[in-house]
Amino acid sequence: MPGGQGPGVAYERGTQAFIYTALAASNAQVGLAAPVGAGIFGIVPTVSRGQLPFNGVFQIRAIGGSFTSFSVTILGSLDGVNFFPISAAVTQAAPTNMSVNGGIFTAETSGAVGIDFGVRYISAVVTALVLGTATGLELSFAV
């Protein structure tokens, strides 16, 4: 973990990490805490001696079917305790490559505002989740 603080797991570059594996209902954030049940990952904020920003790719997947709706916002933290939105909401309609089956988006395409400025922990909040024929939502990322 960065600095040995906070909850969660230290992220190992090159692996797929799961923030949610089978979320069946919206998981709202209460106050500034990470949503209950959400994965929290400590990340190295930059690579190449601080010259390159975090270049993560996020994946939302409908398990076993398709969604009616969802809204995912990536959260960032410096201390692993207080989490703030660092992306615009990603829905089944935006960015344009998203669908009722999910999709892949980057920090850039989601309108991220903090990852390249040294955010040390990431998590996510899911709202407006209506499963449709899906049995759950899976949210993962890789760097």
Image (cartoon, rainbow, N blue to C red):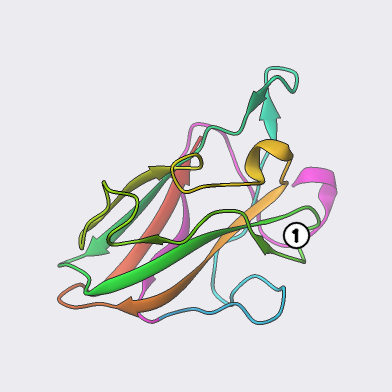
> Is residue 9 shown to the viewer in this render?
yes
Residue 100 in magenta stretch: no
Residue at 77 percent across and 66 percent down: it is 81
Along the line of sight, which residue is nearer the eye, 100 or 7? 100
Residue 120 image position (x, y, % from top left): 73, 46
- Determine whether, in the image, residue 54 is placed left or right of residue 143: right
Residue at 68 percent across and 17 percent down: it is 48
Residue 53 image position (x, y, % from top left): 63, 29
Residue 65 image position (x, y, % from top left): 15, 67
- Determine whether, in the image, residue 87 is placed left or right of residue 30: left
Along the line of sight, which residue is nearer the eye, 114 or 2? 114
Q: SS of the residue at dot 1?
A: loop
> Is residue 16 shown to the viewer in this render?
no
Residue 68 image position (x, y, % from top left): 21, 74
Residue 35, quarter of the rendered image:
bottom right
| Residue bearing mark 1 | 80
Above or below, 76 relative to 50: below
Residue at 78 percent across and 52 percent down: it is 78
Please report the bounds of the magenta region as a residue range: 1-25
Residue 10 in magenta stretch: yes
